[in-house]
Image: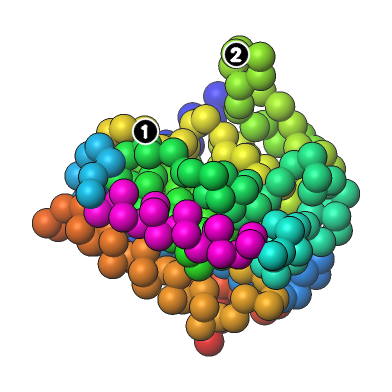
Amino acid sequence: MTDAPRPVALRSGSLADFLAGAEVDPAVAALRPDYRVLLLAVDGMEPGASDEHSGRMLARAEAVARDLLADTPVEDVAHVAAWREAYRSFGAKPQRTRNSLEALVRRAATGLPRVNRLTDVYNAVSVIHQVPLGGEDLPAYAGPPRLVRASGSEVFDTVAGGVDVDEHPEPGEVVWHDAVGVTCRRWNWRQCRRTQLTPHTTSTVFILDALAPLSDEALVAAGDELAGHLARLGPDVGVATRLIAGSTGGQDHS
């Protein structure tokens, strides 16, 4: 019997080495040649409750959302609309399964939840910079993240009706996965339970997704602001980043 892949051991390796194994499959690049992803691997953070700084960040995000939606329906906000079209391209219905940016902007307009200082900050950066942004527990990963079009046999662990269940993505659906299973369905819709952040998370991988009209410069600016806020969460925070352009078949973007 083959042993199951072991979770990532950050202290025995490096954050940059982890990110070096990340891939965007050419089939995804063919679907949306304008796709880019910025990955941040972060270690050394100290868990903590929502604080004054994270509260100010959320208030700033809420103000951005209110301004955005003052005279524009959420579905017509530029990057939200781009992601709606991307969902349609692989058969998802965006009115039923909203991309993470749209879901967060809708919530921000009426008030974002205060969860903890890590979650608060990355939710705020997502809204402020208008970029889908997912955060996951890095040590729970079995190998690096890979973005592919699903075969339909992959396992996605989630909760349905209050019960733990294993689901499967639709064939052709765009998913993030590692050596164990799907970590996020429909590109940036819903994360699995295995890699979700907890109140004790100290090491995280962040995934920032971009489509036109969001520029590389705007994507990097979002990552830079996120990294700056995360550096506050401990005296020895380490950050590694990698920008991958889907149009180059998963290679680093220059």
Residue situated in front as seen by the camera: 33 or 6: 33
Pick the quarter of the image with the N terminus: top right
Badge 1: few (under 14), some or many (20 or more) residues near its Cα, within 10 Å?
A: few
* Residue 18 coordinates in the image, percent (x, y): 41, 58
Q: At which x and y percent is residue 64?
A: 50, 63
Q: Is residue 53 visible?
A: yes
What is the number of the mark on residue 162?
Answer: 2
Relative side of 78 to 194, left or right: right
Question: What is the spatial separation of the Cα atoms under label 1 and label 2, in whole angstroms?
Answer: 18 Å
Question: Looking at the image, can residue 43 be seen?
Answer: no
Q: Is residue 144 above or below residue 114?
A: below
Secondary structure of the residue carrying numbered label 2 = loop
Q: Is residue 93 left or right of residue 160?
A: right
Instruction: Say which mark, if any, is on residue 198.
Output: 1
Q: Earlier in the sequence, mark 1 or mark 2?
A: 2
Magenta stretch in the rendered image: 53-70
Q: Is residue 3 above or below residue 10?
A: above
- Tags 1 and 2 touching, CB below 8 Å: no
Front-most of residues 233 and 252: 233
Residue drawn at x 30%, y 45% as measured from the top left: 117
Look at 70% across and 36% down and name the residue there.
154
Question: In the image, what residue type sits under mark 1?
Answer: Thr
User: Is residue 248 one of those drawn in magenta?
Assistant: no
* Left or right: where 110 falls relative to 57: right
Find residue 190 and report its horizontal and vertical position in percent: 62, 40
Q: Residues within 10 Å of mark 2 (few under 14, many from 20)?
A: few
Helix, strand or loop at mark 1: loop
